[in-house]
Image (tube, rainbow, N blue to C red):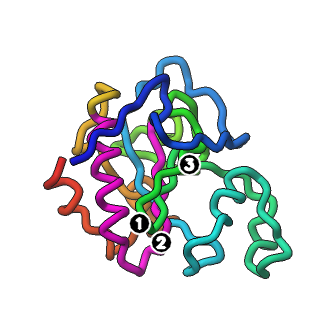
Amino acid sequence: MSIINIKDDLIEGVIFHPSPNFNNRPKDADISLIVIHAISLPPGKYGGNEIKDFFLNKLDTSKNEYFESIKNIKVSSHIVIKRTGEILQFVPFNKRAWHAGVSSYLGKENCNDYSIGIELEGTDDSAFTDEQYHSLMNLTDSLIRSYPHLSKDRLVGHSDVAPGRKTDPGTMFEWKKIINNL
């Protein structure tokens, strides 16, 4: 496993793309959950800059008909892991990214308050790449080492915190591959 260093709530050696879509966590909120998501823009298409542009509120809605339907949505995630395994950071970990929406975990609502959001470039019905799993394992290991309230038992899917509303990361996500290697 490769070592990923986190300093001042940012990943060292990773370009930080500051999203305007965040706010402060509540003062009493400890980072205690990691939420895994899947995203592709447009749906099912990979490799472009559309996810980055979306999180930066710079998405060119004239590029695709689908983009018109999301043009007023303001969201972010702390991290995006591209199909190549490249990691992009959009929000410092100590800040509240807008990734989980209406959500709860084990009876505690508003998961954005206490979670880190990681988006994998993909869909909820297609396989993720080995490169993505490798980056996710390394990053998750580093997050667990850096934030004492995190553990491999506190790694969940968007579908777990927003059941009935969200289905990602989907049935193709290999949970055992991640959990068994942490």
Q: CA distance from mark 1 to mark 3?
A: 14 Å
Vertical comparison of 23 with 106: above or below: above
Q: Residues within 10 Å of mark 3 (few under 14, many from 20)?
A: many
Say which quarter of the image contains residue 97.
top right
Q: Does the magenta segment cover residue 123?
A: yes
Say which quarter of the image contains residue 21.
top right
Q: Please report the bounds of the magenta region as a residue range.
A: 115-144
Sequence-first disc among 2 and 1: 2
Provide the residue designation for mark 1. 169
Residue 93: image x %, image y %? Answer: 49, 33
Secondary structure of the residue carrying numbered label 2: loop
Most foreground residue, 85 or 167: 85
Secondary structure of the residue carrying numbered label 3: loop
Q: Is residue 166 visible?
A: yes
Provide the residue designation for mark 3. 77
Sequence-first disc among 3 and 2: 3
Name the residue type under label 1: Pro
